[in-house]
Image: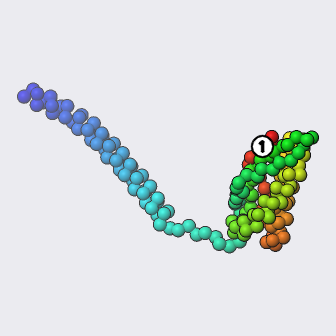
Amino acid sequence: MAKSEAAAVKDPATKGKLKMIILIVVGLLLAIGVSVGATWYFMHSAQSKPVPVAEAAPVGKQPAVFEPMAPAFVANYTQNGRQRYMQVSITLMGRNQADLEALRVHMPLIRNNLVMLFSGQNFDTLATPVGQEMLRQKATASVQEVAQKELGKVVIEQLLFTNFVLQ
């Protein structure tokens, strides 16, 4: 009998602790369930509603569209009786993909003008960063001139040298 009286004495204290543990576990499970359910609800409700896309005139600048010109340009020229070579990889930067597609029809004319421009350069000038930037600006103007003449608008915002090798 002593054992059952001792168990009866411990039982109310253990019942209180056991109830506290059960309440904490149930509270944690409830909190986890609510957070998972809320996350699932908000994720699925965001996916089911299509985001309206404004088709009106864009405010500000449109994102840049880059069009690489392949293959790279290789031009040769003579400097002080010595044969020199230049290889230039070019990427065109515009703001409208449709205009770049329209300009692609005139790529033979653009490539011809650029080869002629590159062949007429001086090695000493091209060896400096200022000379390379001047050449880039001349090449940009050349492409913009063809675009203006053939399409009636300047399609290319910039012409970028992505690789520039002198030998």
Q: Quadrant of residue 137?
A: bottom right
Quarter of the image that includes the N terminus? top left
User: x, y (%) of residue 123?
Assistant: 88, 43
Left or right of 49 in this view: 22: left
- Residue at 47%, 66% in the rendered image: 48
Amino acid at dot 1: Val
Left or right of 120 in this view: 12: left
- Residue at 73%, 55% in the rendered image: 91
Q: Is residue 130 visible?
A: no
Q: Is residue 160 visible?
A: yes
57 shown above or below 39: below
Label 1 sits on residue = 165
User: x, y (%) of residue 5?
Assistant: 12, 30
Residue situated in front as seen by the camera: 58 or 84: 84
Pointer 1: residues within 10 angstroms few (<14), some, or many (20+)? few
Residue situated in front as seen by the camera: 81 or 67: 81
User: x, y (%) of residue 126?
Assistant: 86, 44
94 shown above or below 119: below
Residue situated in front as seen by the camera: 40 or 98: 98
Say which element carries label 1: strand
- Residue at 64%, 70% in the rendered image: 54
Quarter of the image that includes the C terminus? top right
User: x, y (%) of residue 97?
Assistant: 69, 65
